[in-house]
Amino acid sequence: MVLFVAIVRGPNAAIKMVKGNFGICPMTETMEIIHRIHNITPGAIATTAMFAIWCLSGDDSLQQHGANTGIDYIALYKDYLRLITTGIHQDRPEFVNIIQQWDEVVFPGTSTSIVANRSSNGNNQSEVDREIERMDDKEGSDNEE
């Protein structure tokens, strides 16, 4: 979460978070403000996980395939994204809880959480469902090339 905060709010906000000041948003122009980020998304978590792995990998630059490690960072991102979106789409509590935890820590009091209005039967057309459909459409077009 700290890495995500550093990306969207800047390094000082991340340092404050480490010191226990959660939910701090600088009043300067940050990625969060520019892009109107009000809640966590599966893509944000997958991207943050991929960046964290790259930071610890020993690869000097972020490219699709790590020069030193051979890690396929795009495939890694896609795997994480599919895992999280599928888990949320299936109303699996562990994945719904991941989103809730990130929103509670990074965006306390958000009214736009993608899991805020989950129905008990899991029948919820949401941003997550649309993202899964978009990914499936993209995979289909990639396979045609």
Image (cartoon, grey):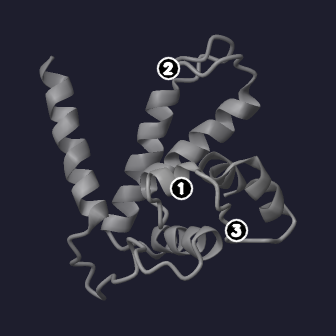
Instruction: Specify the quadrant of the image occupied by residue 91.
Output: bottom left
The percent coordinates of residue 86 (x first, y second) are 34, 58
Would you name the residue on which mark 2 appears? 64
Distance, label 3 to label 1, CA atoms, is 11 Å
In front of the other: 127 or 98 = 127
Find residue 57 and name its label: none
Distance, label 3 to label 2, CA atoms, is 33 Å
Q: Residues within 10 Å of mark 2 (few under 14, many from 20)?
A: few
The percent coordinates of residue 11 (x first, y second) are 75, 48
Find residue 24 and name its label: 3
Q: Is residue 47 above or below residue 42?
A: above
- The residue sitting at 51% across, 47% down in the picture is 46
Instruction: Specify the quadrant of the image occupied by residue 117.
Output: bottom left
Does residue 17 appear to the left or right of 9 in the view shown?
A: right
Going from N to C along the chain, the mark reached first, 3 or 1, is 3
Find residue 32 and name its label: 1
Q: Is residue 126 above or below residue 2?
A: below
Furthest-right residue in this view: 19
Q: Secondary structure at mark 2?
A: loop
Camera sees residue 45: no
The percent coordinates of residue 74 (x first, y second) are 46, 29
Q: Secondary structure at mark 1?
A: helix
Does residue 17 appear to the left or right of 33 in the view shown?
A: right
In front of the other: 44 or 30 = 30
In front of the other: 20 or 90 = 20
Going from N to C along the chain, the mark reached first, 1 or 2, is 1
Kind of residue at disc 3: Ile
Q: Secondary structure at mark 3?
A: loop
Kind of residue at disc 2: Gln
The quadrant of the image that shows the C terminus is top left
